[in-house]
Image: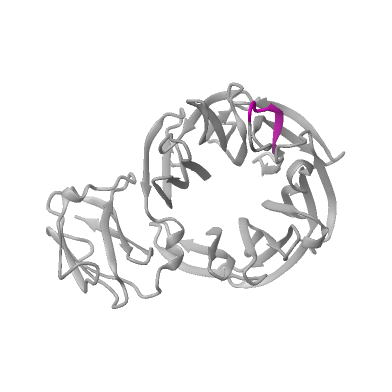
Amino acid sequence: MISSSFYDTEGTHGYLMKVDEYLDTLWRKVIDIYPNETYIFTHAWDGDGFILAGEHQAAGVGNGTFIAKVDTEGQYLWHTVLHEPEEGSYRNRYISAIPEGYIVSGAEGGGIDTEGQIEFYDTQTEVLTTLTNNESAILRGIMSHHIRDNGDIIVTQPIRVTDYPGAVNPEFAYAKSNLYRLDLDIIELELLGEYDGGGEWITGGIVKTIESSQDGLVQLGRTYLEIDESLRQISFVMKLTEDYQVDWYTELSNEICSGCVNELYDIEQAPDGGYVMVGKFNSPEDPYDKTWLVKVDACGDLVWQGCAPVGISEFQIPDSRLEIYPNPVSGNEINIRFPQEVMVEKVVMVDALGRIIPNSKFNIQGSGQFKLESVILNLESLPAGLYTLLITTKDGGVYSEKVMIE
C-alpha cells in the first residue's frame, strides 16, 4: 500500500493506493478526515489493518496531528486527534505499531522553536510518554524512528551545526544527523553516531531508515550542497555497519541545476541486495513534478535512474480503463483503444529497468492528434520482456499499464 496526499482546487486530501506485484493499481481511496485539510504521511501494518500518521490544519493556526485506522481494503475505521491545531504547530511523520500500542515521531513547534518529538500511545491511543529533544535553535529537527529486527528503537534527528554564510533564509545552516538508541526503561536517548556528509550538508535530514540484508542499516536522506556558489538540492543514501560506522555514502541527483528539486522519499531493498528509491524531480525549465526512480547496488554504486511524467497527475486519472490487445504480444503490433473522454498527448514505453524507450523505437499510428479513438504501436524493434505503457493525457492525467512482449 502507498500512503500520500494530493492537492486540488478544493484543498489537500489524504490518499491511499494499493498495487500488486506488477505495480498495477488494485484500488484507490481518498481519506478526507478533515475536509480539504487532510495530510497523510506514513503508514504501518498493525495486525489487522493499517495505521496512518497524519496532520490537519485550521484557519489562522498551525498544524495538528492525528492517527487513523483503515482496513485491508483501505476503508476508514477510526481516527484519534493527538494534537489540536490550536495548541501550536506539530509534525506527525512516522508511525509504528507495537504490541503495547503505537509509536509516533515528528516535531513540535515551528521555525526557531522546533523540537524533535517522539510519543508512545497505548492501544486506546492514550498517550503514555512524550520525549522531546532540541539541540537546534534554527534547523527543523523532525525526528524519525525505526524499530530494528532486534527490537531496538533507533531515532534520527537533524541538528544545526553553524550558520550557512550569507544565507537569506535563516533555516539554511550547516547540519549533521544524529543517530540515537531509545532506552524505554529510562526514556532516554543514547547517542550512537553523528553524520554530516563530510561537513557539507546544509539543512535536510534522514527521511527513512531500513534494515540491510548485509547487516546494519541503510538511511535515505535529503540535503543541499554548495555547488558553483549556489545551493543545490540533492538526495543521498548511506549504509551504516552494525556498530553504526559509515560503510558507504552516495549522493544522488537526476540533474544538478540551480532551482532543481532532487527529492527521494522512499527506499526498499531489492532481491539482488541493491536498493530502489522513489521520489520526484523538477527544474525551472520544467517545473511540473515527475517521478524519479533510482537503483543502487549493494555497494551504493548507481545502477540506473529514470524520470517519468507520472507524478501527482496520476491522481487525476479517470476510472475508465484502456483496452490493450493482444497482451501478451506475440506479433509486432499492439492495439490501444481509449475511453471516449481521453485526450492523448504522449505515448511512451518504459522497460523493466525504468528506462524510457526512445520514440524512434516505435511508431504511433492513429487518426488525428490528441482525440484518438485508438492507436497501433509498432513494436518490432523491441526485445521480449515486460514493459510499462505510459499514456499522458492533455489534462495532465497518466494511464499506466503493463505489456508483455513474447
Q: Residue at x 49, y 68 (%)?
A: 28
Spot occupied by residue 215 in the image (x, y as percentages of width and height): 57, 31
Q: Was residue 165 drawn as part of the magenta stretch in this picture?
A: yes
Residue stretch rendered in magenta on the structure = 156-166
- Which image quadrant for residue 124? bottom right
Spot occupied by residue 217 in the image (x, y as percentages of width and height): 59, 34
Q: Is residue 359 above or below residue 178?
A: below
Q: Was residue 342 drawn as part of the magenta stretch in this picture?
A: no
**Total marks in image:** 0
Q: Is residue 90 left or right of residue 21?
A: right
Quick one: 19 or 157, which is closer to the camera? 157
Residue extending furthest toward the top: 198
* Image quadrant where one finds the C terminus: bottom left
Q: Residue at x 39, y 62 (%)?
A: 24
Q: Is residue 380 left or right of residue 48?
A: left
Q: Is residue 266 left or right of residue 401?
A: right
Q: Is residue 52 above or below residue 191?
A: below
Q: How is the image coloured?
A: one colour
Q: Is residue 357 left or right of residue 243?
A: left
Dominant secondary-structure state across the stretch colored magenta:
strand
Spot occupied by residue 130 in the image (x, y as percentages of width and height): 83, 48
Q: Residue at x 77, y 48 (%)?
A: 109
Task: Examine the rendering and report whether any part of residue 73 can be seen.
Answer: no
